[in-house]
Amino acid sequence: MSSRDAGRQPKYQRIAAELRAAVAAGEYGPGERLPGENDLMVAHGVARMTARQALGVLQAEGIVEARKGAGVFVRDFKPIRRRGIERLAHARWGEGRSVWEADAAGRELLVDSVEVSEEDASDAIAGVLDMAEGGGEKVCVRRRRYTLDGKPVLLATSYLPADLVSDTPITQPDTGPGGLYARLADLGRKPVRFREEIRSRMPSADEAERLTLPAGVPVVLVARTAFDAEGAAVEVNEMVLDSSAYVLEYGFEA
């Protein structure tokens, strides 16, 4: 960026850029406190709102986090590299490993909340699972929250045809080795193809609370559909990711 372009930036963005560069240069390490609003007001000759906006930019980018009554600190959190193709390979869940282990890379990834219920399928879910829309079809719904190193990073909700998975481990909180894909294989409905759709938006109030997101941080939405050998959809998984916690990686042959 040229000095002329920098001069056209709002003051809060210029302050945020200086702080961002200082963090990148190691002047403020993980867990260290950044200058507070009062410090920035004096150093840059700006109003409190400008200083607050500058710090808010870095919070929205996931670089820092605010601690009530203590200040703003550089986040001590290494982003998760989500390898979209590797994690879904049959060689992983077919051998009894969780697809989520690929994300953890040896860190402590836990499911700290699991809710399983049987509900009426929405028209959208019924359409994907090739059910009769508005016909009162039932789906097994599995809602989970994942934490990494103690921090909530992901909300996942799976929908499966209730008549397919009734009275199987899929309806239990713990589906066993390999997860629900291994259990679908046990039922003769092994997933052989996946489709993922990705978009982003700001979180709902409930999502922000469950993921403990600071104001201004968006979420990434990943909607995955699993298909069996006959081409039938056997699961829809709607995931809400903390955008500041993830890097999405897809590697494939040209």
Image (cartoon, rainbow, N blue to C red):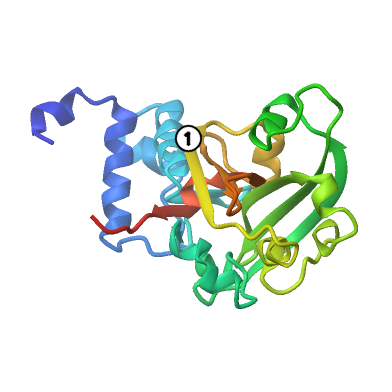
Q: Residues within 10 Å of mark 1 (few under 14, many from 20)?
A: few
Secondary structure beneath dot 1 equals strand
Q: Which image quarter is the N terminus in?
A: top left
User: Where residue 137 sits in the image (x, y, percent)?
Assistant: 84, 33
* Identity of the residue drawn at 63% across and 44% down: 233
Residue 45 visible in rendering: no
Q: On the rendered structure, is 183 left or right of 64?
A: right
The residue at the far right in this view is: 167
The residue at the far front in this view is: 230
Q: On the rendered structure, is 247 left or right of 215?
A: left
Q: On the rendered structure, is 219 left or right of 189?
A: left
Q: Where is mark 1, residue-wise? A: 199
In the rendered picture of this protein, how many numbered marks are placed on residues?
1
- Which amino acid is tagged 1? Arg
* Identity of the residue drawn at 30% across and 38% down: 15
Q: Which image quarter is the C terminus in?
A: bottom left
* Identity of the residue drawn at 84% across and 51% down: 116
